[in-house]
Structures are given as C-alpha cells and as structure tokens.
Image: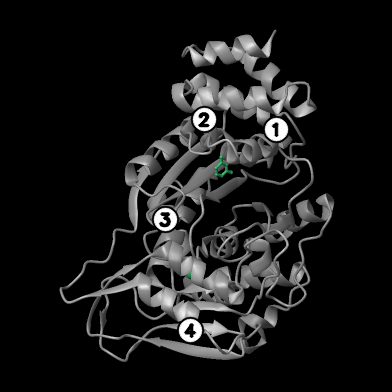
C-alpha cells in the first residue's frame, strides 16, 4: 500500500477501506508515514468528509494505537461522561459521587489541561491532601468499594490521536466533524467505558458555537459509539453563559458540595440530574429515565450523595472535613464586588470572555507551564434574565492581586444589561440517542 494513493483516493471523494485506515494510523504512529502526507490526508478529509464506517474504523484504529484500560475487574456497567468543555462546568465533580451513590461505578481518568480553570484533577486538589497518583489496582479496588475513584491520565493512551490532534492544530484541520468525533470517542473507548453519555455544549463558551454544529457533532459521536459496541447518547446543553455560579477551582468544589447537598444553582443541578439519569439508565440501575432521576433526587435529599463524596475524598487522601467547614478550602486574599452600572435585566454573560477573566486571575493555565491559583475565580450573583439595580453586585471577584481593574473592564464589556425583560436561555436543547 502506498500513502500517496490513499491521499489521492480521499482527495477524489472515495471511501477508504478498514485495512487502508489501519495502515495509515499504524504508519503514522510508528513514524513510517511522515507528517506532510498525513496533513494532506486530513485536509482531504476536511473537504470530502468520512462515511460512518470510516469514522468507526478511524476511531478503533486510534484506540488500538496505544494502551487500553482494562476495567473488567470492576463490577457492573461502567458508564463514562464526557463534556466537550465549557466555562465553570462543575458537572464532573457533582456527577461522580451522585451516580456512584445509586450504585453506578465511576472509574474516572482525568487530567489537568489548559483552560479557564484547571481540569477535574486540579479542582479536586483544592481539597488538602487529595491526590490521583494511585496505582491501577488501588484504583480498581476503590471503585469497587466506593463506586467512584479518579486516577491521573496514564502515559500511552491513543498516541495516534495525540500526534494527529497536534498536526491538525497547525494545519487548520481541527474543525472537521469526523476528525473531532473520532478523536474524542477514541479517548473514551480506550479509557474502558462500556457506555458513554456525552454533554455537547453549545454557545459562546463552547467549542461548537451554533446549535446546528453541536447537533452534527453529537450525532457523529453517538453513531461512532453505537457502531463500535458502546451504548452512547448525547445531551446538547447551553454554554452561552457559564454553568452554575462558580468559575474557579476551590470555588467549584464548594459549588459541587452545595449541589450534592441540594442547595446548588438551578441550572447546574438540572444538568447533573439529566446527565446522571442517562448514566444510571445506561448502567441498568433503573428501568426508565424517570425512575433513574427519582433515585438521584433521593440520594441528594437523604444525604447519600454527599456521604459518597466524603468517602471518595478521604479514600484518596483528601481532608473531607471541608464538606462541613468550607473555610478549609483555599481562600483568596481579596473579594471584590462587580457592581452594576445601570438598572435593567441581564441579557448576556459571554461565557468564553468570562472564562478568560477567570484565567487572568490565575484560575486556569494559559500554557502547560503556568501555575494555577486554586483559590481564585469568579462567583456570579446574576444570570441571564435576572433583574438588576444599579450598584447591586453582578458577581464577586476572588483575587490574590489587589488591582483587578483589567479584569473588571473585561467583565463589564461582556456582561450586558438591557432595559427590556429577557428570557433565561434554554438549558437542555436536545437529547440524541
Ligand atoms: N477535542 C478533542 O479531544 N479532539 C478534537 O479533535 C477536538 C476537540
Ligand atoms: Ca460552575
């Protein structure tokens, strides 16, 4: 087989066979096929697309390019949740203990990564002593015991995707639905999930800004999952404004505690109950989605969800007394109110720019080398549709710098107030199965 013939085939809009896709991914991973040929191919895919069969084959070829996590020693159906990423998305922190509380095993592999705030691991490290550097055996026994554990990302998962994603990044071929869908799905499948619930975000703070694009991506991922034997479904949820109130690491841990106690923000609670009920249903722990939701609501009400979070934190070295005593979480030196400059209704809170403001405070990493400040971030006091009077607080800035004038300016420019009444955005746009 010659790579040049395969590039030509895709350039002309023809379908690549399973053997041809395996040849490409194997050759790219071992270095026998050079970057310049693969970049020509990804550009051809960008323009000509891929069939459903090609997408499933590409996904599995990337899964097989490296290690696959074996979760077979964990009892029950392992359901993983994946979010395409947003601003102040506290769902993973809530969902792990929440669905574990009703008996669904959550074996989560999580990373740090770049962004407005840290990744799930950074957030959890706001709890003193908590760590994810545990061995595979301990990880599996913790999931069997507590139904939830988090382990740091292991070295050699989907190396083909790592290489391909980096190449796409510098060849203007990231924005291709078949390539995005297979990239995301390959990582979930290699991490050992039996079933997958996808939270595809849409709006200003999302990777996909329009509902049409989000739907197309969601459908592509759901088809890949189901075609390779993993039950998969997707929820398309709003990310035009940040989710919940808190954006920042320790601040989001506090928000997760509040939510597990039944006192969290309405939108975050609703999204967690929706995603969670799909997870519980796919795991076979409820006969219907409604029944699944009732189980989760009960776990919040009777305290088992919060107790599960406590066990999870202390089993991985964390000081779980933060649940009762929030003063033990890292605290910023300065808490500054952002006061409304006029009366009206909040009409826009541009999620990605608000995320950038949190990052400027130090809540997230701009580069791999940046240090995160776990204490800092933002807590919204108003969301879209809320009435506000001049001088009232729109949000609080938690900062370790005294001078936050630059951050304030960015925030004022991206929180709009209208004289007319404004409707709150729809939170859950669609569910795709
Ligand atoms: N996220 C991924 O993991 N892969 C892509 O291709 C795009 C976003
Ligand atoms: Ca939040």
Furthest toward the left, the residue is 420
Image position of 353 (left or right of 387): right
- Residue 243 visible in this rendered orientation of the protein: no
Which label's residue is closer to the chain start, 1 or 3?
Answer: 1
Write down the residue under mark 3: 274
- Residue 305 visible in this rendered orientation of the protein: yes
Q: Measure the alpha-carbon separation of dots 1 and 4.
A: 44 Å
Write down the residue under mark 1: 160
> Which is in the foreground here, disc 3 or disc 4?
4
Q: Please name whichever residue, 195 or 299, is drawn nearer the observer in this view of the structure.
A: 195
Which label's residue is closer to the chain start, 1 or 4?
Answer: 1
**Residue ID at (68%, 75%):** 126
> Which is in the foreground here, disc 1 or disc 4?
4
Write down the residue under mark 4: 405
Q: Secondary structure at mark 4?
A: helix
| Mark 2 Cβ and ligand 1 under 8 Å apart | no
Q: Tell me the quarter of the image containing the N terminus.
A: top right
Q: Please name whichever residue, 417 or 260, is drawn nearer the observer in this view of the structure.
A: 417
* Whether residue 259 is situated above or below residue 21 in the rendered picture: below
Image position of 340 (left or right of 401): left
> Which is in the foreground here, disc 4 or disc 2?
4
Write down the residue under mark 2: 224
Which label's residue is closer to the chain start, 3 or 4?
Answer: 3
> Which is in the foreground here, disc 1 or disc 2?
1
Which label's residue is closer to the chain start, 1 or 2?
Answer: 1
How many residues crowd around disc 2 within 10 Å: few (fewer than 14), some, or many (20 or more)? many
| Mark 4 Cβ and ligand 2 under 8 Å apart | no
Q: Measure the alpha-carbon separation of dots 3 and 4.
A: 39 Å
How many residues crowd around disc 4 within 10 Å: few (fewer than 14), some, or many (20 or more)? few
> Which is in the foreground here, disc 2 or disc 3?
2
Q: Quadrant of ligand 1?
A: top right
Tell me residue 67's x, y (percent): 77, 36
């Amino acid at each position: 087989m010659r790579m040049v013939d395969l590039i030509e085939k895709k350039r002309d809009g023809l379908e690549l066979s399973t053997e041809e896709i395996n040849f490409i991914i194997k050759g790219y991973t071992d270095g026998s096929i050079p970057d310049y040929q693969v970049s020509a191919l990804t550009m051809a895919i960008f323009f000509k697309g891929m069939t459903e069969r090609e997408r499933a084959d590409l996904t599995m070829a990337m899964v097989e390019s490296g290690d696959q996590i074996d979760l077979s020693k964990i009892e029950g159906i392992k359901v993983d949740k994946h979010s395409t990423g947003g601003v102040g998305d506290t769902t993973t922190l809530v969902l792990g203990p929440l669905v574990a509380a009703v008996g669904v095993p959550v074996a989560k592999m999580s990373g740090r990564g770049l962004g407005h705030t840290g990744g799930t691991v950074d957030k959890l490290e706001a709890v003193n002593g908590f760590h994810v550097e545990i061995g595979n055996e301990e990880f599996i026994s913790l999931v069997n015991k507590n139904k939830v554990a988090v382990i740091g990302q292991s070295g050699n998962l989907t190396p083909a995707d790592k290489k391909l994603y980096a190449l796409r990044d510098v060849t203007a071929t990231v924005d291709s639905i078949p390539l995005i869908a297979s990239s995301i799905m390959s990582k979930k499948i290699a991490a050992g999930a039996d079933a997958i619930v996808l939270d595809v975000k849409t709006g200003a703070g999302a990777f996909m800004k329009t509902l049409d694009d989000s739907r197309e991506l969601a459908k592509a991922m759901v088809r890949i999952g189901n075609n390779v034997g993993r039950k998969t479904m997707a929820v398309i949820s709003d990310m035009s404004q940040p989710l919940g109130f808190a954006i920042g690491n320790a601040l989001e841990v506090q928000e997760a505690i509040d939510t597990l106690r039944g006192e969290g923000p309405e939108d975050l609670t609703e999204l967690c109950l929706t995603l969670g009920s799909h997870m519980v249903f796919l795991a076979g722990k409820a006969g219907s989605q409604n029944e699944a939701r009732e189980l989760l609501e009960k776990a919040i009400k009777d305290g088992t969800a919060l107790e599960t979070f406590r066990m999870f934190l202390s089993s991985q070295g964390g000081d779980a007394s933060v649940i009762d005593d929030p003063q033990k979480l890292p605290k910023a030196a300065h808490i500054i109110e952002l006061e409304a400059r006029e009366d009206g209704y909040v009409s826009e809170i541009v999620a990605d720019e608000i995320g950038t403001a949190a990052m400027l405070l130090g809540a997230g990493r701009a580069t791999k080398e940046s240090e995160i400040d776990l204490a800092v971030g933002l807590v919204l006091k108003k969301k879209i549709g809320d009435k506000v009077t001049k001088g009232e607080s729109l949000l609080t800035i938690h900062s370790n710098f005294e001078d936050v004038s630059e951050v304030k300016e960015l925030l004022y420019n991206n929180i709009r107030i209208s004289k007319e009444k404004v409707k709150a955005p729809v939170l859950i746009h669609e569910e795709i199965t």
